Image: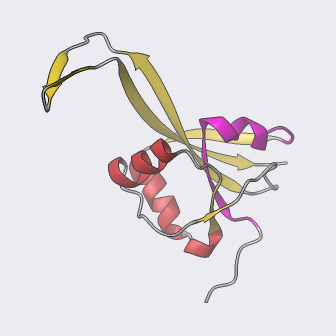
Amino acid sequence: MSKKSDNPLLLLDNSNMTSLINEGEFKCTNMSFEEAREIIGMYDIDDILVCFNHPDIFNIIFNYIGIPKKDYTYKNIRNMRVHQDAIIFKLYTTQSETQPMIQIDGVEAKKIQNIYVYCQHITRLK
């Protein structure tokens, strides 16, 4: 069994990101899904904390982005520590330019939104 890190990797979403960066200096960079997978893969499961509980984010990162699905620990974090890293999964929703109607099991359904996700890496410097 590995020793837990003093600065575990935090996995964040739009809703809790702003509360974690309320003090200090930070560096934030956009990253590809491949880079997010590689960074998460460098950490032991005990050194990763999930700081969100939104089911849509879980579905996106595990089923669409390809992050390995593991039993990550959930923890509500209020502040990032100096030299701590986080990956933010940001959802961006736009209205659908087309709104096609489809039939599913005899019921009409209408597309109303497009949902996009992108990743950012953030580190607390001071």
Residue in the picture at 25% in, 11% down: 98
Q: How many marks?
A: 0
In the rendering, at what x and y percent does residue 48 appear?
A: 61, 65
Q: From the image, which quarter does the N terminus lie in?
A: bottom right
In this view, the residue farthest toward the front is 106
Image position of 12 (left or right of 90)? right
In the rendering, at what x and y percent does residue 100 appear?
A: 20, 14
For this rendering, which residue is in front, 104 or 55?
Answer: 104
**Magenta region includes residue 41:** no
Image quadrant assignment for residue 66: bottom left
Q: How is the image coloured?
A: secondary structure
Image position of 65 (left or right of 118)? left
For this rendering, which residue is in front, 71 or 119?
Answer: 71
Q: Which residues are magenta?
A: 7-24
For this rendering, which residue is in front, 21 or 13?
Answer: 13
Residue in the picture at 85% in, 42% down: 24
